[in-house]
Each structure stands twice: as C-alpha cells, then as structure tokens.
Amino acid sequence: MNRNQNGENNIRQAFLHGKAFIPFITCGDPSLEVTERLVYEMEKAGADLIELGIPFSDPTAEGPVIQEADIRALSKNVTTDDIFQMVKNIRKNSQVPLVFMTYANVVFSYGTGRFMEKAADCGIDGLILPDVPFEEKGDFTDACNTHGIALISMIAPTSHERIQMIAKEAKGFLYCVSSLGVTGTRSEITTDIGAMVRLVKEVADIPCAVGFGISTPDQAAEMAALSDGAIVGSALVKLCGEYGENCVPHVADAVRQMKDAVKKCNIS
C-alpha cells in the first residue's frame, strides 16, 4: 500500500468514519518490542490514530503515571533513533496514523530539521509539543511543513479568546485539553468542552479531540459526544506499568472498551 506523505491528510482520515478514539503510550515502556506489539493490537482493537510518547527526563505536562513511564524507558537507554527505527518497523505492517508527543528540548537537542526529516522518513504523520505555546510554534512550523508533518496545536480551558486564533492555523486535529494541570485520570471533568469546540468550528473545519483526564469508557463517550474524538493516555500507560511485558492484552482490551463506548456517540 502506498502511503500518502502528507501527514495532515493521513490524520484527517482518522476522523472520517465517526468519532475517533486515540490512545497514547510511552515508547519503550516496558520495551520497544512491546510498544510495537501494542500499536498493532490497539489498531485491531479500534484505535483510529495512535500517539507515541518519546520519553523525556522532565515532562512538564505529565502526571506521575506518564512521568514514571518515561523514567522506566529512559533507564533502559531508549533513544530517539531507536524509536524512529521502531516506527519504520511498524510501517511495514500498519498504516494507522501515528503522532509523536514529546517536548521541545527533545527536538532541539536532536536538531529540528534532522528530527522532522527522520520522523517523516519513518512514517510519522504529526507532532505534539505540549510545552510550546502557540506564539512560539514558528520555531518548528517550517521544518514540519517541509517534511509533511502536521504540528498539532492544543487549546485549554484558559485559552479563551486565543481559541479561535489557534484554530485558524491548526493542522491535522486540534487537541482540546479537558482539565487544567497535568495529565492523569480524574473522577470528573467539569470543563465546558462543548463551548470550546463550538468556538473552534465557527472559524475552522478541523477535527477536535479531547484529552487529559479521561480514564473510563463512560468519560470517553461523554467527551466524544461533545467533540470529534477522545484521547486516553494515563489509564493505558498505568496498565503498561502494572503488567509490564504482559500488558498487551490488558491495554488492547481497554482500548476496545473505550472505542466501543465512543462508537455509540455516532449519530446516523
């Protein structure tokens, strides 16, 4: 199967068949071999797009679950080059849209242009940098555009009047942060996601997916009902930490339950 090199187009495909479910896992936790297997099994379980976290020593947007996963991966000397090679292997068997989530320093230290070139070459469609404000994304935009990688923008409950400004320039999909603070599971999400999404849709025809704090199928369905999809990370990464090398069936089962819940939001 020939792969369209335009990452934004590939990402948009994830939202063409109803509400999307987007899982996140940390590369190299518990190992890169298991991460590769997780991608295949999560796709089989219904994942429409998969976020792959490149581990970083100071992940400021992450709660303790993902911080600990980063530490576990880094302690095994997982490198960015190792992750690029893993994605190349995945692309021999899967065309599911893939997005890296990492931090500006990871990209800067590798060399921004070189990072984007390698990411595109291995088959990555998009990049999320949660520590880069909208006003500073220009440091990465040109390199992303040159190599056909969508630089995914984020909006938060505090974005207010900036939401529409960010939406007008957004690529691939817009990551709607459901809760203030860091990633992690929450018992309740009180943000008015519907209002955020309406502001976006007034100015841009771009999918909106909600993440941060979603940990149960019911929460995933609730957020997907108000947007174009749900993103779940900490709840899955927690399973990787709990079950280690045996985590694959547990993560796949959780993804299947989340996707089934999200699918029920589709209105024919």
Image (tube, rainbow, N blue to C red):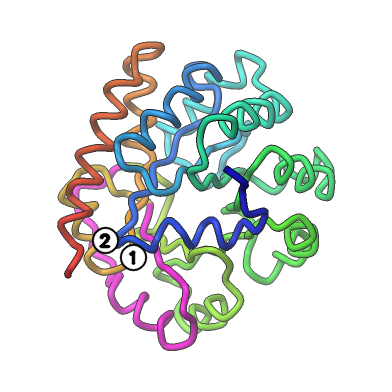
Q: Confirm whether the magenta stretch covers residue 256.
A: no
* Residue in front for this viewpoint, 63 or 91: 91
Residue occupied by mark 2: 224
* Vertical order, 196 against 231 (above or below): below
* Start-end of magenta stretch: 185-211
Looking at the figure, which quarter contains the N terminus? top right
**Residue 223 horizontal side relative to residue 123, left or right:** left
* Image point (36%, 34%), residue name: 42
* Vertical order, 137 against 10 (above or below): below
Tell me where residue 229 sits by quadrant. Answer: bottom left
| Rendering coords of residue 238 (x, y %) | 34, 28
Inspect the image, locate mark 1, and give the three-letter code of the amino acid beneath it: Asp
Tag 2–tag 1 contact (CB < 8 Å): yes
* Vertical order, 102 against 126 (above or below): above
Which element carries disc 2, helix, strand or loop? helix
| Rendering coords of residue 137 (x, y %) | 70, 64
Which element carries disc 1, helix, strand or loop? loop
Residue occupied by mark 1: 228
* Vertical order, 268 against 110 (above or below): below
Task: Residue 160: give its label.
Answer: none
Residue furthest toward the front? 1
Tell me where residue 71 sits by quadrant. Answer: top right
* Image point (31%, 36%), residue name: 235
Tell me where residue 55 sits by quadrant. Answer: top right
**Residue 34 horizontal side relative to residue 218, left or right:** right
* Image point (32%, 54%), residue name: 230
Residue furthest toward the bottom? 202
Q: Confirm whether the magenta stretch covers residue 191.
A: yes
* Image point (35%, 58%), residue name: 179
Per the model, the C-alpha gap separating discs 2 and 1 is 6 Å
